[in-house]
Image (spheres, helix red, strand yellow):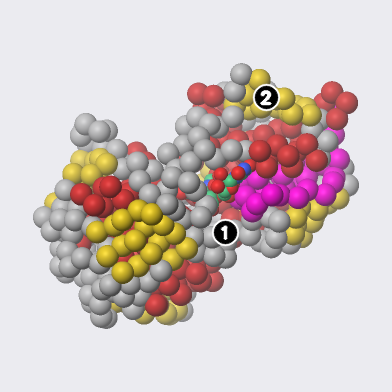
Amino acid sequence: MDAIRVRGQSTPLKGKVRISGAKNAALPILCATLLSEGESKLRNVPALRDIDTTAALLRFLGRDVKVDAPIVTVGPGTVKPEAPYELVKQMRASVLVLGPLVARYGRAKVSLPGGCAIGARPVDQHLKGLEALGCTIRLERGYVIAEGPNGGGRLKGAEVYFDMPTVGGTENVMMAAALAKGRTTLVNCAREPEIEELGRILNKMGAEVDGAGTDVIHVKGADDLHPFDHAIIPDRIEAGTYMIAAALHEGSDVLLEGAELDDLEALSVKMRAAGMTITKEDALMRVQRKGPIRGVNVTTAPHPGFPTDMQAQFMMMMCLARGESVISETIFENRFMHVPELQRMGASVVLRGNSAVVQGVPKLYGASVMATDLRASASLVLAGLVADEETEVRRVYHLDRGYEHIEDKLRGLGANIERVKGVEG
Ligand code: EPZ
């Protein structure tokens, strides 16, 4: 397995970093290609493990997929609508093929994704939404078996109410509704920018989607959808991660190319409160740190609230703040696995239920640490930038799921960082 070695330094990061395309937009959009025949082209796609996993799943289903980052082409093929556990277990987002498959082929057999490191992550809302569109859902030996009305007929538009905002649930049902007969109203939807982007795609394909990105989405299904050619939005979580990197040294001055400041409002507010200067300069976002980091309390929430995917990275920054901060995680039940690793580096964090009380310390100490999930591993690499001596982050395959060339991008900002092959996990 690979590891990433970072030598902590006192010199601030300076320079420009290009933000890649959004992983969490690319994944559902690749699944949306199943809704139509013909060749779809997706541009600005990051070179990530999760993209490769999704491509492998689409190929297994029968489509002809070419991954040549930053372009992914999904060609026609004879599809068998069955997604096996071996593929779905590698990436939970694979469950997003369920809606498109049952909407297009009248039936689908998709492995339940199972839990993951950060929580149980059930899919009951996905299934509830598809049932509202007329699907019969059976759970058998770890698989979801979905069937359209009357033994595999066309789905029918309906009103769908989500018990809580769910990104994947909203996306799965939106895609199914795009081929359903008539109109569907989805209520209490997740409002992430990636959902808005999926709405743009479905409109390009010939559905009529209105309100994506708000909590009520209207979809008028089409009898047939056509392929698309589209360049996806930048990755706001990757951008946020580099914003935090720019906050770790006094004097840092980093330009982010391609980041959408509007999608990062909640994070920017908290970073300004912590003492950072964040400005827009033409098409670039500039992050500067001039003085000390101030302790700031944060509670994660569905978009447009503070993103749970930025919680670990922000906590790492608070480990070096002056004073105390309280970080509360309300989305996932087990998203503090970076805490024991940060504690090994000298951080002062006490867990109280779904909150972490962080006392800022003057410095962190380099150590060998273990990555456990995608965003936790990012927070450990960030810690290594500013800890003394060397930090070795192991099991970086977690990191490679969602960060394109992270060591090259950080080195381009002046970090002393390298990838090491063949390190036992
Ligand atoms: C998406 O996951 C993202 N993944 C996650 O990013 C992100 O953390 C999450 O949204 C929240 O923003 C992708 O987009 C591929 P949810 P998703 O359904 O769709 C509960 C990363 O780091 N829930 O919005 O799985 C669920 O347990 C990843 O890039 C149900 O109870 O998240 C959670 O507590 C990690 N039943 C909450 O809702 C359901 O049917 C939000 O989950 C669905 C969800």
Question: Which residue does the numbered mark 2 point to in the structure image?
Answer: 139
Given residues 332 and 399, the one toward you in this image is 332
Dot 1 amino acid type: Pro
In which quadrant is the C terminus drawn? top left
- Residue 174 is inside the magenta segment: yes
Left/right placement of residue 388 relative to residue 320 reads left
- Packing grade of label 2 (10 A; few <14, some 14-19, many >=20) is few
- Magenta stretch, residue numbers: 153-180
Q: Disc 2 on helix, strand or loop?
A: strand
Please provide percent x and percent y for residue 315.
Answer: 35, 60
Please provide percent x and percent y for residue 165.
Answer: 64, 53
Can residue 41 be seen here? The reply is no
Mark with earlier residue (2, 1): 2
Q: Residue at x 20, y 65 (%)?
A: 361
Residue 251 lies in quadrant: bottom left
Residue reaching furthest to the front: 352
In which quadrant is the N terminus drawn? top left
- Packing grade of label 1 (10 A; few <14, some 14-19, many >=20) is some
Dot 2 amino acid type: Leu
Q: Residue at x 45, y 79 (%)?
A: 280
- Residue 297 is inside the magenta segment: no
Left/right placement of residue 414 relative to residue 146 reads left
Question: Which residue does the numbered mark 1 point to in the structure image?
Answer: 302
Given residues 121 and 390, the one toward you in this image is 121
Residue 363 lies in quadrant: bottom left
Please provide percent x and percent y for residue 352.
Answer: 38, 54
Q: Disc 1 on helix, strand or loop?
A: loop
Distance, label 2 to label 1, CA atoms, is: 29 Å
Left/right placement of residue 280 relative to residue 170 reads left
User: Would you say the beta carbon of the disc 1 residue lies within 8 angstroms of ligand 1?
Assistant: yes
* For residue 317, above or below residue 390: below
